[in-house]
Amino acid sequence: MYSARGDYETALEYLKKSLAIRQEIGDISGLCATLFNMGHIHWQNDEPKEAMSAWVSVYGLAKKINLAQALEALENLADQLKLPGGMNGWETLLDKMQNPE
């Protein structure tokens, strides 16, 4: 709702609270949805590094449990972002995030 109004800071604060709750209860699907939305807020706020970090986290979580809805959303997002390799691009970014040089 706040995001739709353009109040991205308030939206991000609520998403951070939601993220903490979902982590506490172990809701992987909810974590994916929350992180995905946080990525979009960061993107809107011209914070591409934070956005990509959130989306790569979604990929890592969704891949573990084969969460089709999240993986499909990431595939569409990869196309929109022109991410090299599409879904393989998320894998490459995840590997870089987990194994920084």
Image (tube, rainbow, N blue to C red):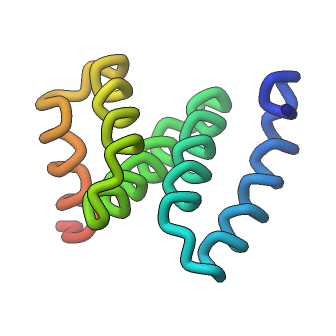
Residue 48 locus on image (x, y percent): 49, 36
Residue 24 locus on image (x, y percent): 65, 82
Vertical arrangement, residue 69 with respect to residue 81, above or below: below
Residue 85 locus on image (x, y percent): 12, 31
Image point 41% across, 53% down: which residue? 58
Q: Nearer the viewer, residue 10 or 72?
A: 72
Q: Tell whether 47 sits left or right of 84.
A: right
Give residue 65's quadrant in the image.
Answer: bottom left
Quadrant, the C terminus: bottom left
Quadrant, the N terminus: top right
Q: Tell whether 56 sits left or right of 12.
A: left
Vertical arrangement, residue 5 with respect to residue 98, above or below: above
Vertical arrangement, residue 88 with respect to residue 94, above or below: above
Image point 19% across, 37% down: which residue? 87
Q: Tell whether 28 sits left or right of 11.
A: left
Residue 23 locus on image (x, y percent): 60, 75
**Residue, far bottom:** 24
Image point 43% across, 52% down: which residue? 53
Give residue 60's quadrant in the image.
Answer: bottom left
Image point 78% across, 64% down: which residue? 17
Q: How many numbered marks are there?
A: 0
